[in-house]
Image (tube, helix red, strand yellow):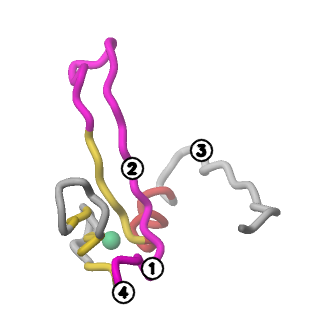
Amino acid sequence: MRIYLDTKETELVSVICNYCKKELPIENGILKAEAIQVKHNFGYFSKKDGQTETFDLCEECYKRITSKFQIPVEKKDITELL
Ligand SMILES: [Zn+2]
């Protein structure tokens, strides 16, 4: 979960892994650790039609969860770094 200082979500105050409750480091509103944010808008064919769900995972929990997949996640190397 992400906590912002204001309702416009401009200044990030806290990012907490939804799975393990670990608080990730933030300095001057900038996240200083890897966080995997998942945001999904449920559509017409879902029982949750019209609902948006969001959560964050720390990198360790992401690895823990995705390592249990029957089909591994697809990986691509990013060749262009900004
Ligand atoms: Zn975690």
Residue drawn at x 33%, y 79% as measured from the top left:
24
Q: Which residue is mark 1?
A: 33
The amino acid on which the numbered mark 2 sits, given as a three-letter code, is Val
Q: Nearer the viewer, mark 2 or mark 4?
A: 4
Q: Residues in magenta?
A: 27-52
Q: Which residue is mark 4?
A: 27
Q: Amino acid at mark 3?
A: Ile
Of callouts 1 and 3, which one flags the residue occurring earlier in the amino acid sequence?
1
Q: For mark 2, what is the residue? A: 38
Q: Is residue 34 magenta?
A: yes
| Residue hosting label 3 | 71
- Circle 4 packing at 10 Å, graded few (<14), some (14-19), many (20+), is few
Q: Nearer the viewer, residue 70 or 47?
A: 47
Q: CA distance from mark 3 to mark 2?
A: 19 Å
Q: Earlier in the sequence, mark 1 or mark 2?
A: 1
Mark 3 or mark 4, which is nearer the start of the sequence? 4
Above or below, comparing residue 47 to residue 58 in the picture: above
The amino acid pointed to by label 1 is Ala
For mark 4, give the secondary structure. strand
Determine if the magenta segment contains residue 54. Answer: no
The answer to whether mark 2 and mark 4 are in CB contact below 8 A is no
Q: CA distance from mark 1 to mark 3?
A: 27 Å
Disc 3 versus disc 2: nearer the observer: 2
Choose mark 1 or mark 4, whichever is in front. Answer: 4
Question: Which residue is at 25% across, 63% downward?
Answer: 2
x%, y% of residue 57? 36, 63
